[in-house]
């Protein structure tokens, strides 16, 4: 971050130091607010949606998003000029200009409403024209608070990765303990590494699961050689899972499960 500041601000060590301290304080404030509002494992707070948790954060004197954080919403009907908003630029065909259908060189020449004809409908029908919302921010704090505000609007949820300990945003209703970041020096993500560890842990704790996986691999390989259809394999798998669960609950002995699975 300091490298970024030295590129755009005068080289003044005391000024850079103050900015670094401000960034550190901003980071702490954003982190505290995010944990309070979005952490789905935070005790009784997890019963409340993010917007109510933010209200509680503000009402309890912990702080809030500054009332005057400087952002400006920009809604463009076709494109945002790349020279001003290159981050938000959405490309359209270079020759896109509905004004041509009306014989205009530019839409700026419009003096009165033009007729909506079948030609204009046909011209726009094949175009990917959308409304885009962009935000003009005036500093790092504005960007941080804007991100936090958008997370509140989306009722986001976060939790700490059980492997690396860093927060990650939960996606939909899919529940997981691990994030999708790659571990330093490894090609696999936390999710891949954690899932593999969890699987080995379950296998170590459940002899029944070991027998099930042994049978599963054998039966699944038969699909490749045409010895069993996918439909029949699915029926076998569901029954085998039920028998394995019954064994884990004490309804079957391990030897009886082995016999049922053909091990």
Image: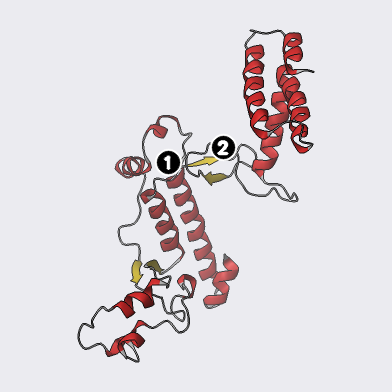
From the viewer's perspective, is the residue at label 1 or at label 2 nearer?
2
Q: Is residue 143 left or right of residue 121?
A: right
Foreground: 156 or 61? 156
**What percent of the width, then of the height, locates residue 68?**
31, 62
Give the residue displayed 32% in from the left and 79% down from the top.
Answer: 120
Q: Quadrant of the C terminus?
A: top right
Foreground: 43 or 156? 156
Earlier along the polypeptide chain: callout 1 or callout 2? 1
Q: Is residue 167 above or below residue 142?
A: above
**What percent of the width, then of the height, locates residue 164?**
64, 42
Q: Is residue 190 above or below residue 96?
A: above
> Where, by quadrant of the figure, is residue 69 drawn?
bottom left
Secondary structure found at label 1: helix
Query: To which residue does mark 2 refer?
Result: 176
Query: To which residue does mark 1 refer?
Result: 36
**What percent of the width, then of the height, locates residue 117?**
27, 79
Give the residue displayed 63% in from the left and 13% down from the top.
Answer: 246
């Amino acid at each position: 971050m300091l490298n970024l500041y030295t590129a755009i601000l005068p080289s003044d060590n005391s000024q850079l130091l103050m900015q670094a301290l401000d960034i550190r304080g901003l980071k702490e404030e954003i982190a505290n607010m995010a944990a309070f509002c979005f952490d789905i494992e935070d005790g009784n707070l997890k019963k409340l949606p993010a917007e109510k948790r933010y209200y509680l954060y503000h009402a309890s004197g912990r702080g809030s998003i500054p009332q005057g954080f400087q952002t400006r919403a920009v809604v463009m009907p076709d494109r945002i000029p790349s020279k001003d908003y290159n981050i938000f630029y959405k490309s359209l065909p270079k020759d896109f200009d509905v004004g041509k259908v009306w014989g205009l060189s530019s839409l700026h020449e419009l003096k009165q409403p033009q007729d909506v004809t079948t030609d204009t409908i046909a011209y726009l029908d094949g175009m990917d024209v959308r409304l885009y919302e962009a935000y003009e921010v005036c500093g790092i704090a504005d960007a941080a608070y804007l991100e936090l505000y958008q997370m509140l609007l989306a009722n986001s949820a976060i939790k700490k990765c059980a492997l690396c300990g860093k927060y990650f945003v939960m996606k939909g209703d899919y529940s997981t303990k691990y994030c999708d970041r790659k571990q330093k020096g490894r090609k696999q993500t936390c999710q891949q590494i954690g899932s593999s560890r969890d699987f080995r842990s379950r296998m170590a704790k459940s002899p029944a699961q070991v027998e099930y996986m042994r049978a599963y691999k054998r039966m699944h390989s038969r699909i490749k050689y045409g010895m069993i259809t996918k439909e029949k394999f699915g029926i076998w798998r569901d029954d085998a899972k039920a028998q394995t669960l019954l064994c884990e609950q004490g309804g079957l002995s391990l030897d009886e499960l082995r016999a049922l699975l053909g091990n």
